[in-house]
Image: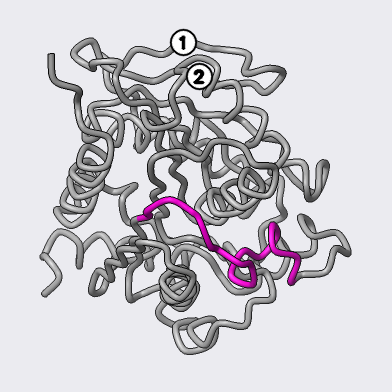
Amino acid sequence: MISVRSYLTKLILRSYISLVKRDQWTLEKRRRRYELFRQRFLKTPKNLLCEKVDADGVPGEWLSFPETRNVRSVLYLHGGGYVMCSIETHRYLIAQLARACNARVLAIDYRLAPEHPYPAALEDATTAYRWLLQQTGDPAKIAVMGDSAGGGLVVSLLIALREKNQPLPATAVCLCPWVDLTASGESMQSKAQEEIIIPVKHIHQAIDAYAAGTDLKTPTLSPIFADLTGLPPMLIQVGTAEILLDDAKRLAARARACGVDADLEIWQDMIHVWHFFSRVMPEARQAIARIGEYVQLKIPLQKG
């Protein structure tokens, strides 16, 4: 049963969104609003260590805490429908994940559509992963992680690496992943009225911007249609109150059919990437803690 805090958070979000008429916003306004939301409500933790880096041409940032042991490294790919958001908008969430995983996190600002359509984001993710691999020297110490479009990009990255016979990371984590740009999942319709965070209209705008005419069933554009054989273990989290519910369920089913160890967690009544609201939602803190447990299990500390 949903907590009182989460129920109230959903109620406030729905009330606010109904007032601001978000479905009429331009892309530029949506970008500005997300940045403003971060500045007002998602303050960077005071003891978070932030170091800007150039990951072989891709702008990035190392995020960690003083107590973090640099044994595990996470490559984080932010969400935003491939058309908005950044390290800035996601820094608070990434910080919580870094602490939970006891890892340092490399977050990147991959190029966004429509200015840079497919495969720009995938190219940047691939470049950043290779750079990270050079820094660590051991793929068994790396996890890749992302939310929403970033979660889909995680799977696309793994496919691209496998196809080029590149070393794969130890594990992957997908938060409410968007893996089907044909938008054919049943929940796209059945959950449309329940969805709070991403209107279906915005999904189709993002598809047009990012795909830019590319066949929507291209495996590294919509990895739900890909052969996932040989990919590393993955944790998939999704809420029941979002239109991407079926994307996550079908991803898990397809991964398992291809022999991949896929752990699907469906969180009752949770909204899209509820993890953002860990300050007020107990379920967000619980989900982040679960991710930390999973990553530490897949990348254990070496003895001695």
Q: Secondary structure at mark 1?
A: strand
The quadrant of the picture occupied by the N terminus is bottom left
The circle on residue 40 is none
For the rendered model, the colour scheme is: one colour
In primary-sequence order, the first of circles 1 and 2 is 1
Q: Amino acid under label 1?
A: Glu
- 289 above or below 190? above
Instruction: Give 140 or 121, whichever is nearer the viewer.
Output: 140
Q: Is residue 218 magenta?
A: yes
Question: Residue 243: where, in percent of width, then height?
Answer: 48, 75
- The picture quadrant where one finds residue 169 is top left
Tag 2: Cα neighbours inside 10 Å, few (<14), some, or many (≥20)? Answer: many
Count every numbered label the image shows and give the total.
2
Q: Could you tell me how far apart the alpha carbons at marks 1 and 2 are, in whole angstroms? A: 5 Å
Residue drawn at point x = 42 percent, y = 30 percent: 91
Seen in the image, is 113 located left or right of residue 297? right
Q: Which quarter of the figure has residue 203?
A: bottom right
x, y percent for residue 9: 25, 59
Residues rendered magenta in the picture: 217-234
Q: Is residue 92 left or right of residue 250?
A: left
Task: Using the image, determine if residue 190 lies above or below residue 285.
Answer: below
| Residue 270 is a magenta residue | no
Q: Which amino acid lies under the numbered mark 2 shown in the image of this protein?
A: Glu
Q: Which residue is mark 2?
A: 61
> 10 Å neighbourhood of mark 1: few (<14), some, or many (≥20)?
few
Q: Magenta region's main secondary structure?
A: loop
Residue 51's disc number: 1
Where does residue 145 sit, x and y in percent of width and height?
Answer: 43, 43
Q: Secondary structure at mark 2?
A: strand
Residue drawn at x 32%, y 56% is 274
Q: Position of residue 223 (x, y in %)?
A: 62, 64
Q: Residue furthest right?
A: 213
